[in-house]
Image (tube, grey):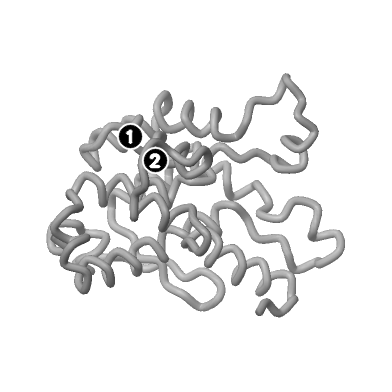
Amino acid sequence: MIDTIPELNGAGLQLLRIPAEVDVPLTGRVVQILDTPSMQRLRRISQLGLVSYVYPGAVHTRFEHSLGVYRLACLTLRHLLANESVLASSTTTDEIKIFLLAALLHDIGHWPYCHAIEDLRLAEFPRHEELARTLICDSPLAVVIEREWSVEPARVAELIASTRDGGAEPSVLRSLLSGPVDIDKLDYLQRDSLHAGVPYG
């Protein structure tokens, strides 16, 4: 199955280097996702909001973090599909593509200072999960997902939403994206620590 997913088989990949000296594998269809206005806006959104006022190095972005989570998704899937026959035989190609997209797009709905504003519970501000669904399903991003990945954008949005609300059923892929130990946490704990100059662990 790894051979059918270009992001996992390693053929014809470009590499993009991000801190901490790691290479993110890029295919043409991943680059098309990254080039959408919805993804490019994440370049201007701080991962840690106002933390840079205390830790001046903590100026990394949601874009960098999204690339890091996507990279971990590729590494994790490559390992699990090669070594866990039950998972490999029970997971479809579409489920893998949806998972990779969800890893890359999991923070697409964030805006500047999102968590601080959401904590105020202001009715006039939609939750970032609602914005994520809109951006994934009703924007140029939806066209790229349908045309290049051949999956329904709504399924990507549903996987991202299910990681926030618990979803209808347990899923190995969902728990890899959001669980007690998941690829999102693995990336941001290391990345935030690196940029803030504060050791973690």
Identify the secondary structure beneath mark 2.
helix
Residue at 43% of width from left, 48% of height from top?
34
Identify the secondary structure beneath mark 1.
helix
Residue farthest top in this picture: 124
Q: How many neighbours does mark 1 have within 10 angstroms: few (below 14), some (14-19), or many (20 or more)?
A: some
Residue 20, image quadrant = bottom right
Q: Which mark is residue 48?
A: none
**Relative vertical location of residue 134 with respect to residue 110 in this rendering, above or below:** above
Q: Position of residue 103 (x, y in %)?
A: 42, 52
Q: Position of residue 60 (x, y in %)?
A: 65, 60
Residue farthest right in this picture: 54
**Amino acid at dot 2:** Leu
Q: Quadrant of the C terminus?
A: bottom right
Residue at 24% of width from left, 37% of height from top?
151
Q: Quadrant of the N terminus?
A: bottom left
Q: Give the tally of numbered discs.
A: 2
Q: Nearer the viewer, residue 36 or 95?
A: 95
Q: Position of residue 83 (x, y in %)?
A: 21, 73
Q: Residue tagged by mark 2? A: 159
Question: Spatial distance from mark 1 to mark 2, Cα to Cα?
Answer: 6 Å
Q: How many neighbours does mark 2 have within 10 angstroms: few (below 14), some (14-19), or many (20 or more)?
A: many
Q: Residue tagged by mark 1? A: 155
Q: Position of residue 50 (x, y in %)?
A: 80, 52
Q: Nearer the viewer, residue 118 or 134?
A: 118
Asked whether the residues under the numbered discs 1 and 2 touch, taking CB atoms below 8 Å apart as contact, a structural biologist would say: yes
Residue at 60% of width from left, 34% of height from top?
128
**Relative vertical location of residue 119 with respect to residue 73 in this rendering, above or below:** above
Residue at 50% of width from left, 64% of height from top?
181
> Is residue 153 toward the left or the right of residue 87 in the image?
right
**Amino acid at dot 1:** Arg
**Relative vertical location of residue 55 with respect to residue 93 in this rendering, above or below:** below
